[in-house]
Image (cartoon, rainbow, N blue to C red):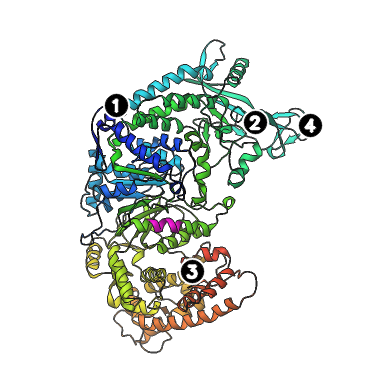
């Protein structure tokens, strides 16, 4: 359990850091702290975007440079130069996308040691790091959150034998070689000082024996000092019980008689353990609802600010307590009230700092302001502030800086549950729980015992100290606090792999939620750089898109060519999903795979439609190697350069994907679909500001000539050999789900249907109509079935030989038609009026004819003079935007975009890309 590195803190054991030798760990810390202190005096350093709000003293007290700084880490370049391996294009590197299960490992003691708003468990990340990297490689996570990417990187060198055996066995089943075990280095960054503080405590481990000894001593000290605050007399009048939590009740005024109403007394049905929607006034008998009540406020002097405060009135209602192991509840008696009054008369520690909520710019400000909560400390009772402040004062006296920092984390982990955000949950297992992700003080807050909460955390940390966490080394980590788009200390092309879990649009408002936590550590986020959608801060989807593009561009800059990034993303809005996709492509990445985990069935599926964004998505993207870029710059956007991209892109895609269930099925690899390949190629050229050198019909016709096709997928020759081997072993191919949400997906659905079953219009109609129900985009005009068939497919009219596609289908499915010639009357009669998919040459002619018709219709959109085009054909808009881009007519793109509803533009990747680039070209004067 003992880690020698941390035992050196108070000894004369020499230590090495970045090639420098120091006589002790203390000397190392002093040296780099002095350098950081000098850096903090530089005004230019403090002007770095994302620099947190805090004094030099607070930042230095929190930091352990060069491994962790509570500000932008000025030692990142030293870390990379000392530990990194320079990019060498002669070293062969090839990987396929790696799918991960983001729900795995949520019961692991490391994961449970400290909560955060969102977390991908480290055990879900470990396989990806092993897959993409070698021991000693540098991994980056610019949205580090609680630091699970760092934990995963270090776990690769500390994983127990049982875990290694299990993973190696699973990889053998998949035909993969065993991974190379060994710790990876990691750079973690986050805008929030709260997040990087948690990251440090997860990744810059300390001496476990010393930590547990100090934690137990701290617990005993606070029990002796403050235990009386959580004592209550049992209903037998003799025995002293220990309070688990006290329920407070908001007090209202009856609108009819102005009598005071204790909410829980009036509305809580204790037999049913639920709050009644209607209840009677105990004074006048009026029938009431909660909304009909008037709030009562109390005006008093705030013990922290010294100013008058006006907050809703609460009174103690119920005490949940234990006598021995038995749990009881009681109404607070006179003795309990006397204890509360004694507590109120006790001065708070001077360390309790005032921090005002920026109510007007907070999404959840409307929940705080009506009840009078203006300051972070007001979310706590006087008792909770006394105990938390006292704990902080005792921790400050701990000698070891590493142990001291982890102890702070141990206590601050419970600051949400210790606050009035903790609500009474009658009838539930624990009886009380905080609502996460929102500032909300209910009318029945449950004030939990801080001592009991900390006791629970100490138990968690005891379990933590039995894990590989004790073997982690601070030498493997560099943690920085700042903006993910400004990692200027990291040299370009130096990072081996990126794993990141970015903010999901407007799902969680991290900076706001961290205000209360950061008040305890004395350093605050700079929310202006936060990549979220928040109307209260003037940030819509366009602002989110720009911020994410800047962050991804920084990832692309520092990543080595040909290396990979994994992005975990969860948002049900198609517009946010498209913003992420477009930002990735504009930053320079090429998406190779997008999969989602079905948490109900425990299986993966590949995403084919924006309507499918219901679960956590895992995006695998790579930075193209420098050779592709160089050839494009040298030869320009030629047809050959388009096929050069395809050749390079196909190499990055998996040849075989197999389902995890039984019996096994081969997965249809969506990224190998011809149209998806064309889209990736087109995005590549558009991002480089050039015309796409080949049209869709020409591309689709030439693709099977240059490459190999099977089961609707495109392969390189050696990849097809691998796929065919798997196909002979696993004959069943599981097709990707396809949702009809627009005209293009309707055409794709009909293509898949007719390839398998050339059919008459009357046979197609009942199968097609159910596909365009709830998945259809709002405001999207999908042409009628007859028009879709006429514009995109061919119908056999009975003249001439039966087309091969129809002949093959009929002879396979009808015994009486087998062996007949293609001009046989019986075969012709059965084949007449069936629609089928044209061969590539005829498809080109159809596509050109269709494109001409689309552009003609686009002219009506250009001429539109109303406020908004409420309904439109997406294919018309795409064709028009493409044509305008090719003609460098950026104003037409911008002009038509301004006439569209925001969701029409934001929910389509192609329109959003061209519009965003058109804006950029116009702003740059190109």
Query: Which one is earlier in the sequence, the residue at label 2 or at label 3?
Result: 2
Residue 10 circle label: 1
Crowding around mark 2 (Cα neighbors within 10 Å: few <14, some 14 to 19, many 20+) is few
How many circles with numbers are drawn on the protein?
A: 4
- Give the structural element (helix, strand or loop) at label 3: loop
Q: Earlier in the sequence, mark 3 or mark 4?
A: 4
Residue 96: % across, % down: 28, 59
- Residue in the foreground of this view, choosing between 919 and 379: 919
Residue with the mark numbered 4: 257
Q: As displayed, is residue 297 above or below residue 809?
A: above
Identify the residue position indicated by label 3 in the image.
924
Q: Are marks 2 and 3 in contact (CB under 8 Å)?
A: no
Classify mark 3: residues with Cα within 10 Å, few (<14), some (14-19) or many (20+).
few
| Residue 550 inside the magenta-drawn segment | yes
Name the side, left or right, on which 435 lies relative to 7. Answer: right
CB atoms at circles 1 and 4 under 8 Å apart? no
Q: Is 161 within the magenta?
A: no
Q: Compare marks 2 and 4 and give the one earlier in the sequence.
A: 4
Which element carries disc 1, helix, strand or loop? helix
Residue at mark 2: 307
Callout 4 secondary element? loop
* Residue 439, image x, y percentages: 56, 40
Magenta stretch, residue numbers: 548-554
Pointer 3 or 1: first along the chain: 1
Please tell me in which quadrant of the rendered image residue 408 appears.
top left
Q: Are marks 2 and 1 in contact (CB under 8 Å)?
A: no
Judge depth for marks 2 and 4 and give the one in front: 2
């Amino acid at each position: 359990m003992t880690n020698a590195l941390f035992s050196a803190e108070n000894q004369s054991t020499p230590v090495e850091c970045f090639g420098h030798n120091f006589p002790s760990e203390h000397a190392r810390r002093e040296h780099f702290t002095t350098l950081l202190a000098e850096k903090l005096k530089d005004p230019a350093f403090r002007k770095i975007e994302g620099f947190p709000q805090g004094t030099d003293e607070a930042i230095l007290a929190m930091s352990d440079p060069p491994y962790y700084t509570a500000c932008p880490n000025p030692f990142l370049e030293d870390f990379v130069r000392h530990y990194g391996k320079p990019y060498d294009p002669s070293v062969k590197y090839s990987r396929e996308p790696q799918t991960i299960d983001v729900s795995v490992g949520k019961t692991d003691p490391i994961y449970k040691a400290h909560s955060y708003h969102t977390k991908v468990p480290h055990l879900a990340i470990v396989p990806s790091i092993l897959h993409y990297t070698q021991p000693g490689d540098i991994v980056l996570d610019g949205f580090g959150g609680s630091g699970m990417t760092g934990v995963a990187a270090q776990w690769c060198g500390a994983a127990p034998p049982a875990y290694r055996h299990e993973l190696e066995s699973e990889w053998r089943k998949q035909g993969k070689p065993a991974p190379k075990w060994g710790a990876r280095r990691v750079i973690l960054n986050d805008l929030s000082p709260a997040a990087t503080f948690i990251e440090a405590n997860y990744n810059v481990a300390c001496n476990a024996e010393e930590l547990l000894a100090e934690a137990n001593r701290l617990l005993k000290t606070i029990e002796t000092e403050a235990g009386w605050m959580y004592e209550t007399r049992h209903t037998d009048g003799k025995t002293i019980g220990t309070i688990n939590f006290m329920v407070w009740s908001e007090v209202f005024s009856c609108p009819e008689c102005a009598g005071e109403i204790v909410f829980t007394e009036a509305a809580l049905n204790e037999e049913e353990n639920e709050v009644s929607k209607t209840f009677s006034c105990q004074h006048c008998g009026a029938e009431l609802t909660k909304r009909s009540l008037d709030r009562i406020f109390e005006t008093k002097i705030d013990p922290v600010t010294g100013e008058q405060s006006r907050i809703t009135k609460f009174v103690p209602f119920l005490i949940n307590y234990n006598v021995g192991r038995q749990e009881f509840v009681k109404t607070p008696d006179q003795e309990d009230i006397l204890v509360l009054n004694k507590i109120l008369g006790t001065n708070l520690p001077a360390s309790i700092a005032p921090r005002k909520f920026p109510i007007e710019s907070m999404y959840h400000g409307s929940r705080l302001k009506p009840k009078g909560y203006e300051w972070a400390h007001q979310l706590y009772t006087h008792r909770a502030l006394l105990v938390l402040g006292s704990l902080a004062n005792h921790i400050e006296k701990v000698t070891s800086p590493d142990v001291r920092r982890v102890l702070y984390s141990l206590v601050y982990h419970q600051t949400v549950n210790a606050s009035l955000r903790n609500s009474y949950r009658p009838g539930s297992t624990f009886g009380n729980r905080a609502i996460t992700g929102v500032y909300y003080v209910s009318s029945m807050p449950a004030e939990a015992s801080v001592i009991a909460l900390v006791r629970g955390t100490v138990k968690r940390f005891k379990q933590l100290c039995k894990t590989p966490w004790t073997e982690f080394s601070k030498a493997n980590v560099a943690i920085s606090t700042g903006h993910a788009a400004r990692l200027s200390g990291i040299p370009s092309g130096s990072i081996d792999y990126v794993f990141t879990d970015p903010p999901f649009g407007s799902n969680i408002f991290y900076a706001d939620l961290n205000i209360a936590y950061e008040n305890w550590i004395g350093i605050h986020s700079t929310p202006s750089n936060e990549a979220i959608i928040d109307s209260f801060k003037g940030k819509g989807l366009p602002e989110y898109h720009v911020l994410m593009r800047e962050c991804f561009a920084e990832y692309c800059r520092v990543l080595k060519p040909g290396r990979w990034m994994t992005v975990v993303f969860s948002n049900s809005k198609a517009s946010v999903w498209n913003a992420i996709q477009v930002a990735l492509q504009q930053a320079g990445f090429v998406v190779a795979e997008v999969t989602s985990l079905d948490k109900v069935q425990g299986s993966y599926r590949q995403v084919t439609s924006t309507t499918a964004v219901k679960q956590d998505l895992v995006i695998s993207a790579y930075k193209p190697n420098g050779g592709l870029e160089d050839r494009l710059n040298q030869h320009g956007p030629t047809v050959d350069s388009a096929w050069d991209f395809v050749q390079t892109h196909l190499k990055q895609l998996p040849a075989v994907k197999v389902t995890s269930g039984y019996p096994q099925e081969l997965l249809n690899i969506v990224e190998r679909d011809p149209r998806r390949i064309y889209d990736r190629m087109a995005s590549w050229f558009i991002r480089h500001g050039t015309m796409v050198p080949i049209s869709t019909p020409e591309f689709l016709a030439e693709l099977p000539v240059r490459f190999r096709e099977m089961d609707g997928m495109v392969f390189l020759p050696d990849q097809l050999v691998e796929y065919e081997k798997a196909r002979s072993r696993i004959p069943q191919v599981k097709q990707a789900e396809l949702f009809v949400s627009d005209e293009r997906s309707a055409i794709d659905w009909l293509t898949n249907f007719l390839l398998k079953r050339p059919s008459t219009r009357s046979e197609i109609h009942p199968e097609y109509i159910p596909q365009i129900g709830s998945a259809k985009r709002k405001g999207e005009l999908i042409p009628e079935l007859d028009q879709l068939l006429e514009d995109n497919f061919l119908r056999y009219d009975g003249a001439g030989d039966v087309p091969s596609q129809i002949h093959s289908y009929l002879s396979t499915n009808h015994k009486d038609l087998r062996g007949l010639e293609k001009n046989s009357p019986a075969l012709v009669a059965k084949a007449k009026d069936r629609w089928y998919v044209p061969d590539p040459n005829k498809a080109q002619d159809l596509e050109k004819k269709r494109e001409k018709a689309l552009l003609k219709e686009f002219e009506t959109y250009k001429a539109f003079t109303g406020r908004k085009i409420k309904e439109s054909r997406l294919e018309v808009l795409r064709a028009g935007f493409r044509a305008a881009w090719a003609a460098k007519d950026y104003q037409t793109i911008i002009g038509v975009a301004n006439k569209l509803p925001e969701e029409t533009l934001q929910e389509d990747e192609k329109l959003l890309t061209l519009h965003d680039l058109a804006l950029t070209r116009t702003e740059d004067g190109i």
